[in-house]
Image (cartoon, helix red, strand yellow):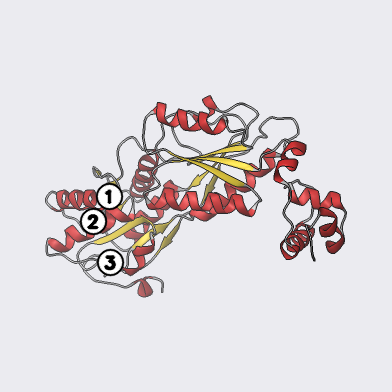
């Protein structure tokens, strides 16, 4: 086809009305998935590009979503940001991103206000430790997505805000229960930084599993998510307690802990079993592949976007009610755990 492809061309090729093509292009509801996919296929095949300026004037939408992203030098926040951007593009939206690695209210508030001032269609906040309540700077009619555990103890989410996060409590409970099931009498814990919601949730899951088994909860050591802090915390534990099983709140600290254990003359899992959290790409390729709890960052982002996009199309300008969503975490068995006193591989553990 020569010349500029029009909406009428797409409609004719797909065998639908121009109104249907318009609904698909604008992300409106009331179009079946099969029909939507057919129209999108023809749009891609013909190379149709809608006039964004004209469409924005008609629909009063910018087709852009603002994202406040914190700590993106770390695996979890970076993976979440990537998932959000990918999910937004798949839904036909561009993203405007403001990075904020500062943990004070003023920095986070400036980031939110900056995005609100751009006339975007929605705001998503993916910042693991931002103490500010983002709703205080988001107009009531602007759809809002919070990427955090629905039970996070920050300021309560505003009515209708979409809240989606990982099941940190459930993942930590599963990791601890796995170690207890192997026969370890107790499980020690290297937690994340004090004051973080994910630190509290993972520690709560660990403690709950111990209490359910009738085991006293020992004091946790804290790190700062880095491998160096995991190394230091493990060294302190090795000098203070009889350690056979260790649940660590993220994989980076677990890697540091394993290094400290091996430098002390002990082996993983022969002498000490270790479980991490996150399932970073390197976890499967360590000298002893790491048993860990996998967070599905892509699914967290996709679920958030699936709930956020319909809110953009709400006719009354209010946020529709949306329940908090916890995305399950999965325990991934590898070779860093075994019964006390006898090594066992992940393949044996699955039998």
Residue at 30%, 40% (x, y): give it: 193
The image quarter containing residue 344 is: bottom left
Mark 2–mark 1 Cα distance, whole angstroms, equals 8 Å
Front-lying residue, 302 or 54? 54
Question: What residue is pinned by disc 1?
Answer: 226
Q: Is residue 272 left or right of residue 28?
A: left
Question: What residue is pinned by disc 3?
Answer: 339
Q: Is residue 213 left or right of residue 111?
A: left
Tell me which label, 1 or 3, sits earlier in the chain. 1
Q: Which mark is residue 19?
A: none
Counting other residues with Cα less than 10 Å from the Cα at mark 1, is it few (<14), some (14-19), or many (20 or more)? some
Counting other residues with Cα less than 10 Å from the Cα at mark 3, is it few (<14), some (14-19), or many (20 or more)? many
**x then y, percent, for residue 115:** 54, 34
Secondary structure under tag 3 reads: loop
**x then y, percent, for residue 91:** 65, 51
Query: Looking at the picture, does residue 33 appear above or below residue 318?
Result: below
Q: Nearer the viewer, mark 1 or mark 3?
A: 1
Tell me which label, 3 or 2, sits earlier in the chain. 2
Label pair 2/1, CB-CB below 8 angstroms? yes
**x then y, percent, for residue 316:** 74, 30
Q: Is residue 8 left or right of residue 162?
A: right
Question: What residue is pinned by disc 2?
Answer: 256
Front-lying residue, 167 or 271? 167
Query: Looking at the picture, does residue 271 appear above or below residue 99?
Result: below
Front-lying residue, 6 or 166? 6
Q: Quadrant of the N terminus?
A: bottom right
């Amino acid at each position: 086809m020569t010349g500029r492809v029009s909406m009428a061309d797409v409609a004719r090729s797909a065998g639908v009305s121009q109104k249907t093509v318009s609904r698909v292009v604008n992300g409106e509801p009331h179009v079946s998935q099969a029909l939507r996919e057919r129209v999108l296929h023809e749009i891609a095949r013909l190379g149709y590009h809608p006039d964004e300026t004209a469409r924005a004037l008609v629909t009063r939408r910018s087709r852009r979503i603002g994202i406040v992203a914190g700590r993106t030098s770390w695996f979890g926040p970076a993976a979440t940001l990537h998932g959000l951007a990918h999910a937004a593009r798949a839904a036909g939206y561009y993203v405007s991103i403001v990075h904020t690695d500062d943990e004070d209210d003023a920095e986070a508030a400036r980031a939110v206000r900056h995005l609100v001032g751009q006339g975007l269609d929605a705001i998503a906040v993916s910042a693991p430790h931002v103490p500010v309540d983002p709703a205080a700077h988001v107009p009531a009619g602007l759809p809002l997505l919070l990427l955090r555990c629905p039970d996070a103890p920050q300021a309560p989410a505003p009515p209708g805000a979409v809240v989606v996060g990982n099941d940190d409590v459930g993942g930590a409970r599963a990791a601890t229960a796995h170690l207890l099931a192997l026969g370890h009498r107790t499980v020690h814990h290297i937690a994340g930084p004090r004051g973080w919601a994910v630190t509290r949730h993972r520690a709560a899951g660990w403690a709950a599993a111990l209490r359910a088994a009738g085991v006293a909860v020992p004091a946790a050591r804290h790190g700062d998510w880095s491998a160096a802090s995991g190394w230091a915390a493990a060294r302190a534990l090795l000098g203070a307690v009889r350690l056979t099983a260790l649940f660590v709140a993220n994989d980076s600290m677990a890697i540091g802990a394993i290094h400290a254990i091996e430098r002390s003359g002990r082996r993983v899992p022969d002498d000490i079993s270790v479980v991490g959290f996150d399932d970073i790409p390197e976890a499967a390729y360590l000298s002893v592949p790491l048993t860990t709890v996998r967070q599905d960052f892509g699914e967290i982002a996709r679920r958030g976007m699936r709930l956020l996009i319909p809110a953009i199309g709400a006719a009354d300008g209010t946020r529709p009610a949306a329940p908090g969503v916890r995305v399950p975490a999965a325990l991934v068995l590898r070779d860093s755990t075994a019964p006390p006193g006898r090594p066992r591989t992940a393949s044996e553990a699955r039998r």
